[in-house]
Image (tube, helix red, strand yellow):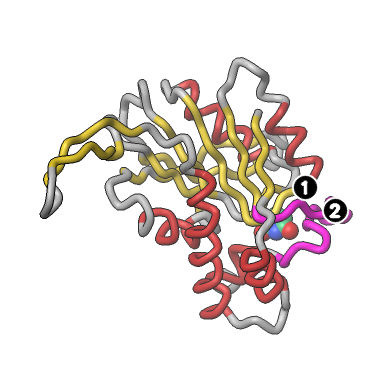
Amino acid sequence: MRLHVADHPLITHKLTVLRDKATPSPVFRQLTEELMTLLAYEATRDVRVEPVTIDTPVVQTQGVRIADPKPLVVPILRAGLGMLEGMTKLVPTAEVGFLGIVRNEETLLPATYAERLPDDLSGRQCFVLDPMLATGGSLAAAIEYLFERGATDVTAVCLLGTPEGIKAIEALGDDRDVTLVLGALDEGLNENGYIIPGLGDAGDRLYGTV
Ligand code: URA
């Protein structure tokens, strides 16, 4: 697994406002989207492109465009939805699939409760969006699910992560081509499973408690 933790004052500034419990939902949503756009720059560093010839007003020249099959962006429901616009703004030709994962309270294992993905993911570069990498159980399950469906490589983007979460993604093994992009690496988890210092429940702060 390749790990990239952002190191940029603009990202740290926006994360600081996001962490502040006084930040209201509309600002939280806006900042989540902006942070995703900044992280998308790093997350798409290895996006596949193909050569293309174009005419400038002056000469013919070579450039690139995003290759087929187009990248697949997969926000994990529900908090990942807050990051979607920030990603598609930068990669408008990407396709979007949806994955909902919850912990089964009997087995304590992550289980898929909603899935809307293309049937065949062969040859696909996938970008999974999930703001909080806490224990890593559901993100690891989501990534593994995409590989089982044929994805060639998966980049996961999280606003905050923990050492425990990173270990869970590493445990997927070297034969899985995974890149993890974090806005910041936090200290760890408290006894209730919240990231410390974190920002609270990302879904609640984006959408209110339901
Ligand atoms: N999910 C959240 O939304 N927040 C945390 O701190 C941990 C998991």
User: In terms of depth relative to the viewer, which is nearer, 87 or 133?
Assistant: 87
Rendered view: 77 above or below 51: below
**Residue 140 position within the rendered picture, expressed as x and y whole percent measured from the top left:** 63, 34
Query: Earlier along the polypeptide chain: callout 1 or callout 2?
Result: 1
Please state if 65 lies on the left or on the right of 137 as rendered: left
- What is the quadrant of the N terminus in the image? top right
Q: Secondary structure at mark 2?
A: loop
Which quadrant does ligand 1 occupy? bottom right
The magenta span reads 183-200
What amino acid type is highlighted by mark number 1? Thr
Q: Is residue 93 magenta?
A: no
Please state if 119 lies on the left or on the right of 150 as rendered: left
Q: Secondary structure at mark 1?
A: loop
Q: Residue at label 1?
A: 162
Majority secondary structure of magenta residues: loop
Q: Please rate how many residues cluster around mark 1, counting C-alpha atoms within 10 Å: few if below 14, some from 14 to 19, many from 20.
A: many
Rendered view: 171 above or below 70: above
Tell me how far mark 1 sits from mark 2, CA to CA. Answer: 6 Å
Pick out the residue farthest to the right: 191
